[in-house]
Image: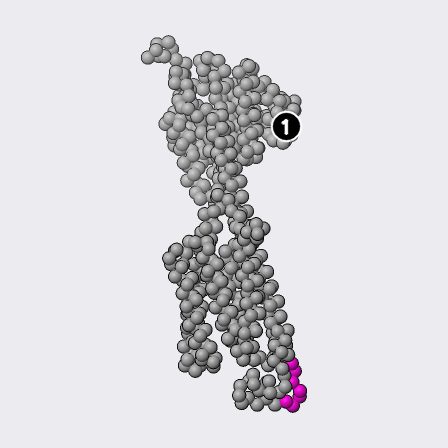
Amino acid sequence: MSKLKDYFKIYESENTRAVFEQNEYEANRLSLIVILWCGAILIFSWVLNLAGVFTVEKQRMNILAISGVAEFAVPIVLYFIYNGKKRWLKYVMVITLLFVCSQLFAILNHNVILIMIIPVLLSSRYFSKGFTTMISILSIVLLAGASAISVLYGIVDLNFFPALKDGTVITVKDGLRASVTALGISDKKAVISMFVNGFVPRMLVLSIIGYIAIYISKHGHDMVMDQDEISRVSANAKAELNTATQIQNGMVPNIFPAFPDKKEFDVFGAMYTAKEVGGDFYDFFLIDEKHLAVVMADVSGKGVPAALFMMASKILINDRAIMGGTPSEILEFVNDRICSSNQAEMFVTVWLGILDIETGKVIAANAGHEYPAVCRKGEGFELLKGKHGFVVGGMEGVKYNDYEFTLNNGDTLFLYTDGIPEATDSSLKQFGVERMKDALNNAADTSVENVILNVKNEVDSFVGDAVQFDDLTMLCLRYNGAQTQTESEE
C-alpha cells in the first residue's frame, strides 16, 4: 500500500509546492473547460437527435443526455465551491469525464471512439504519473465494458462480424441485429469477433496514447523539479557572487576623501565590473609619510577566476611596495612570485607609480598597461607615453624599466583600463582614446570625482543599449603641491 501511495505522490520541495499547487489549479481549470464543452456538445447532440438529425434510439439518447448532464454537474459545482484549488478535485473531474465518455461510447460505439482519448490526455496535465496511469488503466477497462454494452444495446458493426458467404443478402426488417442473427451467426461468436476485431485494436491504440500521456506527466513533474534545482543552484551561486562582489569592492579603496589630512593631493577611484566580479583593480596607499603609491591593473579574463587573480596580485603589489624599492623592482618581484605558481596561466597588466608628495615627482613602471593621461594646469589631457614592459605573470625573470615625470601644482593624473577606450556601441564602434580625452577635458576643471563620473557618463551614452563586455576602472589624482606648516594649520 505504501508503494502505491508513493506512486501517486507528487514529489515536491518547499520551493516547488507553490508551483505544483498553481499547476493543479490551472489543470483543474482546463478540466472544467473541457467538461463544459463536452456538456454543451452532449446537449447539442441530444437536441439534434430529438429533431431527427441523428438516428440514435431516442430512449437511450435521453437516458445518456440526462445522466451525463447530471454527472457533469457534480464536478462543476465542486469546482466553484472550492474555487478549483483542491488537489482532490482532479479525481472527481477527470473520472467523471471518463465515465460520461464511456457511456457515450457505449451508445454510439465507433462513431465517438476518439472521445475516450480526452480524459487520458487531460490527466497528463496534472504532472502526476500515478494519476495518469490510473486514468489510462480505467480508460481501457471502461473501453472494454462500453464495447460489451454496445453489443447488448444492439449496435452492430458488420466490419467486426465473421465474413458472410458470397451472395448473402441482408434484409433489414426487424433491425440490423435481428437480421444478422437470422443469418445463423450466434451471439457468442459475434461478441468474440467484435472483441477481437474491434476492442483489441482500440485497446492497443489507447494503451499507446496512455503511455505517451504517462511520459508527458512524468516529464512535466521532473521538469519542475529540475528547474527548481537549477534555480536553487543559481540562487546559491548568485548569493556567493554577491558576497564575492562585496569582498572585491572591499579590497579596493572606496572611502573618500581617502586622506582627509593630506592636502597635497586629491584622489578618487571607481570600478564598474562587466560581471558580478571582475579582474580590473585600482589601488593607492601611503608607503610612508612622503610617498604615495598609485596602481592601475587589468587581469586577463573575466569573472571569478579573474577576481581571484586580481586579489592575489593586489596583495603582492601592496605588500612588496611597503617594503620599499622602485616600481620596476616591485613589479619584478611580483612577476616572479606569480610565475612560480601560475597554473592558470593568467597575467595582469599593471601601471605602478610612486608620487613624492613634497616635490610632485613620480617614478613609474608600466607592465603592458594603457598609457596614463596627464592634464597640466590650464591645459588639456594628453597621453603620457613611457616605456612599456611585459605583462606580469607572463614569463619569469622579466626586467622592467622605471621612468619619471613631475606633477606641478594643479596637474591631474588619470589612470584607466582598456575597458574605457575599447567600449563598443551596438555597431561595434569603439569609444576610443580621442573621445576619452574629450570627456576628460570637458571636466578638467572640476573635482577628481566629477572627472571620473563624466567619463563614465560619456561611455554609457556612447554604448547605449549594447552589452558591457569589459570592466571599466578609473583613478584620478590631482596634485595640489607641498603644503607649508602654516597652510596645513589653516
> How many labels, in total?
1
**Residue 156 part of the magenta segment:** no
Between residue 347 and residue 459, name the one nearer to us.
347
Between residue 311 and residue 125, name the one nearer to us.
125
Residue at image x 55%, y 77%?
152
**Residue 163 part of the magenta segment:** yes
Quarter residue 204 falls in: bottom right
Between residue 374 and residue 221, name the one nearer to us.
221
In this picture, which residue range is highlighted in magenta? 162-168
Residue at image x 41%, y 36%?
457
Vertical arrangement, residue 333 with respect to residue 78, above or below: above
Q: Is residue 386 visible?
A: no
Q: Residues within 10 Å of mark 1 (few under 14, many from 20)?
A: some
Residue at image x 37%, y 57%?
81
- Tell me residue 142's x, y (percent): 55, 67
- Tell me residue 450's x, y (percent): 38, 29
- Quadrant (top left, top right, bottom left, bottom right) of the C terminus: top left
Instruction: Provide the major secondary structure of the magenta segment.
Output: loop
Q: Is residue 226 visible?
A: yes
- Tell me residue 234's x, y (percent): 52, 40
